Image (cartoon, grey):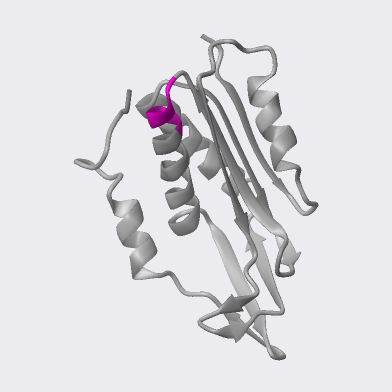
Amino acid sequence: MTVLSTVRLQREPFDAAAEAAKLTRGRSDVGALVTFTGICRGDEAGEPIAALTLEHYPGMVEAEIERHVQEAKERWPLLGVTVIHRYGRMVPGEDIVVVVTTSSHRAAAFAAAEFLMDYLKTRAPFWKQVEKAGEKTWVEAKATDDAAAGRWNAGGRQAAE
């Protein structure tokens, strides 16, 4: 079985629908397609956000995301995975990240997409800076995000149907 896999970092916007179509085109073995697109919000804790800037260490981020994509492919019977993450300055309403997973069955596609997003949110080596009312602050990790990601550790959810 061929598992299509793409990991890409880029400044420019992406087309989530086109990326999803690449994983299903010409395939009759795909029974489930799950997409998640993270979008830059216009507020944080009730305060307006002017922009979000994501910085990364080139080469290191791609290798780390690839490693987690490989783990997802080992945990679930996936037919395809795409992870595209933007970096640079983004304004509210712009897409930040897309994760697309395909499988024969929905449970595997959903679980793998959720696993990958929890990883990207908590462990991917990105630095996030928020611009509000003329000031810029670096965003700290959130305990709630760490708790969500922790369920995938040993003893956490494993392979789905």
Horizontal side, residue 4 vs residue 21: left or right: left
Q: Quadrant of residue 106?
A: top left
Along the viewing direction, whichever of 35 and 147 lies nearer the viewer: 35
Give the tally of numbered discs: 0
Horizontal side, residue 100 vs residue 51: left or right: left
Looking at the rendered image, the quarter that the C terminus falls into is top left
Q: Position of residue 118 (x, y in %)?
A: 43, 51
User: Magenta stretch?
Assistant: 105-109
Along the viewing direction, whichever of 72 and 67 lies nearer the viewer: 72
Q: Position of residue 154 (x, y in %)?
A: 22, 41
Q: Quadrant of residue 53?
A: bottom right
Q: Give the overall secondary structure of the magenta segment.
A: helix
Residue at 51 percent across and 53 percent down: it is 124
Residue at 44 percent across and 26 percent down: it is 73
Q: Position of residue 10 (x, y in %)?
A: 74, 49
Does the segment drawn in magenta span residue 107? yes
Horizontal side, residue 21 vs residue 46: left or right: right
Q: Residue furthest right?
A: 12
* 82 over 79 or under it: above or below: below
Does the segment drawn in magenta span residue 115? no
Q: Residue furthest left?
A: 155
Residue at 44 percent across and 49 percent down: it is 119
Q: Residue furthest bottom?
A: 134
* 15 over 120 or under it: above or below: above
Q: Position of residue 134 (x, y in %)?
A: 72, 90
* 132 over 101 or under it: above or below: below
